[in-house]
Image: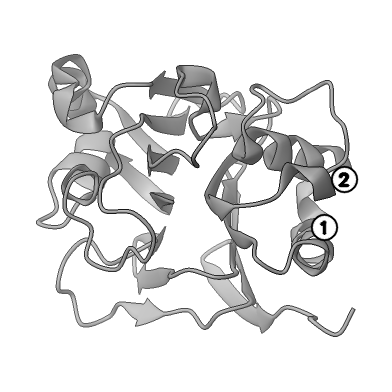
Amino acid sequence: MCRHLGWLGKPRSLAELILEPPHSLLVQSYAPLRQRHGLLNADGWGAGFFDVSGSDKPRRWRSAAPLWGDASFASVAPALSSHCVVAAVRSATVGMPIEASATAPFTDGIWLLSHNGVVDTAVLPASRGAESVCDSALLAAAIFERGVDSLGEVITEIGSGDPQARLNILAANGSRMLATTWGDTLSMLHGADGVVLASEPYDDDPRWVDIPDRHLVDTHDGEVRVTALDVSR
């Protein structure tokens, strides 16, 4: 299991989003509060973002080491700002490789995508575009190939093929952010300057709301739509 976070709104530094809150992703890497599977997220971390220059190309910083041990990122994160960020800390599924390429966020060159959960790779289509052989990378490739716009449909189909799957997805392309809840927690903080979606709240702001299980969140142009996934398929 993992923890992830997404931001879409006015530019904020990566330190402000990932390192500085009292229950930040950094803290969640060693002391998560709502994590149902696993106690630590020490098998890597990653941060993806779109730079403020206006480029539509996502940038990434990924490592197979724990976030708490990356002094280089801590030193530059205050200087990196973005209006759109996807970040994650990883607890690897048993048997899956621990390497930077197996760490979210994954990308197709347009979208950044993180998977919080586990899925039987036997129910996933074969893909030559996956960044790793781990379940999350194969799932990301399947979503990219179908199109992230079809995220809810893809997750519903995969979930029906693997009833034990946990399929919390977080994806963003610089102007839109999508997320699913399927077997694990997700919370949202919608403020005047933007929207945070996170596996668990990073502070005690009373505006945090929990997203119900098996729902899709769609954030665009400051608007947020939360809809139930069609589990009758």
For label 2, the residue is 146
* In this rendering, position of residue 6 left or right of residue 177: left
Which is nearer the eye, 127 or 75? 127
Q: Which disc is residue 150 wearing?
A: 1
Write down the quadrant of residue 149 in the picture: bottom right
Query: Element under label 1?
Result: helix
Q: Amino acid at mark 1?
A: Ser
Q: Residue furthest top?
A: 72
Q: Using the image, determine if residue 103 lies above or below residue 157.
A: above
Colour theme:
one colour
Q: Position of residue 180 (x, y in %)?
A: 61, 65
Left or right for 23, reference 164:
left
- Is 67 drawn above or below residue 89 in the view shown? above
Secondary structure at badge 2 equals: helix
**Quick check: 51 left or right of 135?**
left
Q: Are marks 1 and 2 in contact (CB under 8 Å)?
A: yes
- What residue is drawn where x is 36% and y is 29%? 44
Query: In percent of the image, x 82 and y 50: which residue is there?
Result: 123
Q: Is residue 139 placed above or below 229 in the rendered structure?
A: above
Measured as percent of width and height from the top left, residue 83 is found at 42, 43
For the point 29% across and 68% down, the residue is 34
Residue 232: image location, x then y, percent: 85, 85
- The quadrant in which residue 220 appears is bottom right
Q: How far apart are labels 1 and 2 at the CA level?
A: 7 Å
Q: Which mark is residue 189?
A: none
212 with respect to 143 (left or right): left
Q: Quadrant of residue 87?
A: top left
Above or below: residue 81 compared with residue 40: above
Which x, y percent locates residue 33? 22, 65
Name the foreground residue: 154 vs 221. Answer: 154
Q: In this view of the protein, which residue sits in the foreground, 193 or 140?
A: 140
Decide: few, some or many residues near mark 1? Use Cα within 10 Å; few <14, some 14-19, many ≥20: few
